[in-house]
Every structure is written in C-alpha cells, then in structure tokens.
Amino acid sequence: MTGRYYEEFEVGETIEHEKRRTISERDNQQFCDMTMNQQPLHLDAAFAGDTEFGERLVNGLYTMSLAVGIAIPDTTDGTIVANLSYDNVEHPNPVYHGDTIRVQSTVTDKRETSDGERGVVTMHVEVFKVNHPEEPLVCEFDRTALSLKREHDD
C-alpha cells in the first residue's frame, strides 16, 4: 500500500507522479475494443488523415483513465473507500500514438465526512505531453475520492 490517508493530504500541494507512459497504437486499439468505441478518428488511419488532425487520435477516455492509474500509487492506493466523482474534464490538446505523458495532482479541497470517520479529498489532475517542447496540457479534470483516515489508538 502506497496511498495516503486523509490526514496526509495538504490543500495546495502538488504531487508530481514519477511514472510516465508512452501510448502505443496497441494501447489505443485495445481500449477502443474493450469499450466498444469504434470511432474512426481513433482507429481508421485513412479517415483520420483527412481530418484537421492528420492522423489517428488516442481516445480521450483512455488518456484520462491512464492518468488516474498513474496517480493512484501516490494518492489513494489502499487508502481509498471509493472514487466519488470526476468533474470538469477537458482535453485541450490531442494525444497521438507514440506520445509520452506525465501526470500531476494538486489537492484542491479536503473535508471530513459528517460522521468524522473518513475524509473527502478533491484533486485537480493534469496530464502533459512530455515528448513535445512546450509539454502541452492534453487532459485535466477534478477527481474526488472518499479516503480512509488513519486508525488512532484512543
């Protein structure tokens, strides 16, 4: 277990997740297959070549899901009760096969539950493309999780 308990999150702190991932054509294809998303912009090179992007795009939901997976070890691995919401999702720039992404999470809010036994933590997650000189933002969203509190001996 590597995640943080509620008490270990500090509002305003930014957690730089060390793990990165280069997204392959196979990753994108498999995600589209598993989710039954057959959008030709993700899968058909000829179709995508005729769009403003000029090539296939990585499925934005895969980018978001991958970001959550990368963030979990440093945030909620083994200390989460449940993910409560994903809000304000944006994809300001495209991701292509071969792009490498990095992720950071900034704690924006935390509060105890009404019974005081757990805590709710909200993080703003940002995903950047690192194989591009400007490291453009390619996805961002707010993730809210119900977190365990440390057990205290009374």
Image: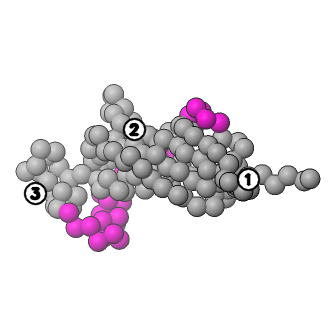
Residue 110 vs residue 37, the one in the foreground: 110
| Position of residue 92 measured from the top left corner of the image (x, y, whole percent) | 29, 40
Q: Viewer-proximal residue, 32 or 22?
A: 32
- Is 28 magenta? The answer is yes
Question: Does dot 2 land on a helix, a strand or a loop?
Answer: strand
- Mark 3 or mark 2, whichever is nearer to me: 2
Residue most toward the left? 50
Displayed quadrant of residue 115: bottom right
Q: Position of residue 150 (x, y in %)?
A: 78, 51
Kind of residue at badge 2: Phe
In this rendering, the count of numbered labels is 3
Q: Looking at numbered disc 1 in the image, what kind of residue is underneath it?
A: Gly
Q: Report the residue at 39% width, 38% height from top.
A: 128
- Residue under label 3, please give it: 46
Residue at position x 46%, y 46% in the image? 142
The answer to which of marks 1 and 3 sits earlier in the sequence is 3
**As displayed, is residue 63 above or below residue 12?**
below
Q: Residue at x 34, y 41 (%)?
A: 138
Q: Magenta region: which residues?
A: 10-39
